[in-house]
Image (cartoon, helix red, strand yellow):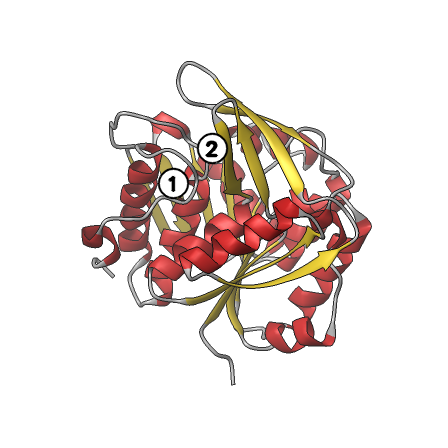
């Protein structure tokens, strides 16, 4: 029987800002926020046999966040982050690191069979080892589970083949407006409206839900005949690091707890707006947000 375990699989790392480092990685951010909503969530990744790896696991332990994180003979991942005047991050992602080399083990195979929802992206698939592990994990999951592809295109770390394969494996797609433009070119989508391009992707890859975020311009959710658009709340932005991951987590948490797509969309917008008002990708959410579910 499928349990209620939620997994974020892929990169876990340190975001290194001018003022210091903060724990990050989209799958870890997703899993952390799902744990705040009361789910049994896990981070699946790898860290090095080094001090930075120790600190990541200590951080997770301090947050009460469960994990399946292997220690491997590669350095723990780091990302150099700079912010522009509006708090928008620019990333320099180091290569040849631990999360590029996540092994597939019998323990991980057993975990996959118990997962109700998994979130993965394109970045962790830049190396064949983690890509193979991710694909085996997805194949071992129940067909009734949610498989969320939060695309997260970063630098040059993606290929059209990997993107097409991931789109074929997921049933929920989350992307932003910049990524929609890139996919429109790579997949040769029509030059029609945003909605028509999204619907075209949904039809081509048999997606149940497509989530499109457009920064300050708002966000969309498409699911069956549902079309939901919401404006982005005006908040004082500290930084936007991890805001998209919190959006994905809040949306999934609401749907898993029986809320409608429109209700889930509204909740995701509120949660991500709060995260934008805080520093770092893993702020503690206020009780009024966590209690809404």
Compare marks 2 and 1 and give the one earlier in the sequence: 2
Q: Quadrant of residue 188?
A: top right
Residue 126 is situated, as x and y percent measured from the top left of the image, at 74, 43
As drawn, which residue projects farthest toward the top?
85
As drawn, which residue projects farthest toward the front?
51
In the picture, the disc for residue 194 is 2
Q: Residue drawn 25% across and 32% down?
A: 233
Under circle 2, the secondary element is helix
Vertical order, 235 against 100 (above or below): above
Vertical order, 155 against 126 (above or below): above
Q: Residue drawn 29% across and 39% down?
A: 274
Is 66 in front, or is 208? 66
Q: Are marks 2 and 1 in contact (CB under 8 Å)?
A: yes
Q: On the picture, is 199 further left or further right than 95?
A: left
Is 34 in front, or is 159? 34
Under circle 1, the secondary element is strand
Q: Quadrant of residue 235?
A: top left
Vertical order, 292 against 242 (above or below): below
In the picture, the disc for residue 220 is 1
Vertical order, 231 against 10 (above or below): above
Q: Residue drawn 43% across and 49% down?
A: 248
As drawn, which residue projects farthest toward the bottom?
1
The answer to whether one can see residue 202 in this image is no
Residue 128 is situated, as x and y percent measured from the top left of the image, at 81, 50
Q: On the picture, is 1 further left or further right than 95?
A: left
The answer to whether one can see residue 154 in this image is yes
């Amino acid at each position: 029987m499928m349990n209620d375990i939620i997994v974020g699989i892929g990169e876990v790392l340190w975001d290194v800002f001018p003022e210091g480092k903060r724990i990050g990685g989209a799958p870890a951010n997703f899993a952390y926020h799902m744990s705040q909503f009361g789910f049994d969530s896990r981070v699946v990744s790898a860290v090095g046999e080094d001090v930075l790896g120790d600190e990541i696991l200590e951080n997770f332990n301090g947050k009460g966040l469960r994990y399946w994180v292997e220690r491997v003979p590669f350095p723990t991942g780091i990302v150099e982050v700079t912010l522009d005047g509006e708090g928008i991050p620019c990333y320099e992602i180091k290569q040849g690191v631990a999360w590029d080399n996540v092994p597939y083990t019998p323990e991980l195979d057993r975990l996959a069979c118990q997962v109700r929802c998994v979130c993965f992206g394109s970045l962790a698939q830049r190396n064949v080892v983690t890509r193979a592990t991710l694909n085996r994990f997805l194949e071992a999951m129940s067909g009734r589970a949610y498989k969320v592809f939060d695309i997260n295109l970063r630098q040059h770390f993606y290929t059209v083949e990997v993107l097409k394969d991931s789109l074929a494996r997921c049933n929920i797609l989350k992307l932003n407006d910049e990524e929609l433009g890139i996919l429109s070119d790579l997949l040769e989508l029509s030059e029609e409206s945003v909605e028509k391009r999204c619907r075209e992707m949904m039809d081509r890859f048999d997606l149940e839900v497509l989530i499109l975020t457009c920064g300050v311009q708002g966000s969309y959710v498409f699911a069956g005949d549902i079309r939901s658009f919401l404006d982005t709340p005006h908040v004082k932005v500290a930084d936007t690091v991890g805001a998209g991951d919190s959006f994905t987590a809040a949306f999934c948490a609401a749907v898993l707890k029986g809320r409608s797509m429109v209700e889930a969309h509204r909740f995701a917008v509120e949660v991500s707006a709060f995260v934008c008002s805080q520093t770092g990708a893993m702020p503690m959410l206020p009780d009024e947000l966590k209690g809404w579910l």
